[in-house]
Image: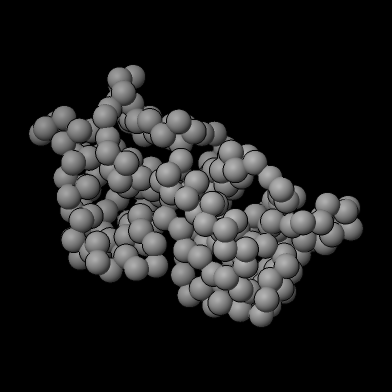
Amino acid sequence: MLIIEDEKRLAGNISQSLRESAGYAVDYAPDGSEGFHMAQSNSYDVIILDLMLPGMDGRSVLQHLRRGGCTFPVLVLTARDDKETLIQVLNDGADDYLCKPFDLGELIARVKVLIRRGKGQTTATLRFGKIEVNTADRTVRRAGTVVGLTGMEYRVIEYLAHRRGAVVTKTELLEHLYDFNWERFSNVIEVYISGLRRKLENAGTEKLIHTIRGHGYTLKE
């Protein structure tokens, strides 16, 4: 997730809430030009974009991203609540907006909805086989019984569930789990996958997380 916001205190509060309440990895850009560069160079589940930015204003960032083919969901933050401004940002390609000041709980809820929409999900519960992943309360059930997962294990299985059937590379998982400096965590994916297999699969009878040698992992029955 990327936050493009020049108010450092606000950006810090949003980042902290997203990390602690929802477990998201968050990158931050303090101006429009840097944010535009980061959005072009990386894959994000959601971009949170302020309109009043130094370097390049938020509308310009949004317009350039959409013209360049960027399809990441964008949630716009604005201090203006007049109808004309809101119509403009929606026509520019924003997926949603919040007027300042706003409740952080509402922001997190809207972000979760945008992530689900961006991945083609219409409900908060992802199902495959006997496994249910509830993205609203961040729980996983196997045959109806809650499975105790660590925070990182949950985030791995949620991401794989959103992408089930597709091959997800180790790099994709690292970029999803950690912020811009993910390289120092490069040896932990195997640990999380091993823990998930132990907790979610019946030994020898049920394999859900498959290793595609030299490519990554895929989730399928």
Rendering coords of residue 47 (x, y %): 57, 60
Residue 171 visible? The answer is yes
Give the answer, above or below, for where 194 lies relative to 30.
above
Horizontal side of residue 209 vs 91, given as left or right: left
Horizontal side of residue 177 vs 137, given as left or right: left
The mark tally for this picture is: 0
Write down the quadrant of residue 198 in the picture: top left
The colouring scheme, among rainbow, by chain, secondary structure or one colour, is one colour
Quarter of the image that includes the C terminus: top left
Rendering coords of residue 33 (x, y %): 61, 79
Comparing 220 with 97, the one in front is 97
Horizontal side of residue 219 vs 95, given as left or right: left
Comparing 110 with 53, the one in front is 53
- Taking the view exactly as shown, the residue that stands out farthest to the left is 204
Comparing 52 with 76, the one in front is 52
Could you tell me which residue is drawn at 62 percent across and 63 percent down? Answer: 7
Residue 63 visible? The answer is no
- Taking the view exactly as shown, the residue that stands out farthest to the front is 9
Write down the quadrant of residue 72 in the picture: bottom right
Horizontal side of residue 30 vs 82, given as left or right: left
Could you tell me which residue is drawn at 20 percent across and 33 percent down? Answer: 199
Give the answer, above or below, for where 65 lies relative to 168.
below
Rendering coords of residue 216 (x, y %): 26, 59
Give the answer, above or below, for where 38 lies relative to 153.
below
Could you tell me which residue is drawn at 18 percent across and 61 percent down? Answer: 187
Could you tell me which residue is drawn at 72 percent across and 65 percent down? Answer: 51
Rendering coords of residue 122 (x, y %): 57, 37
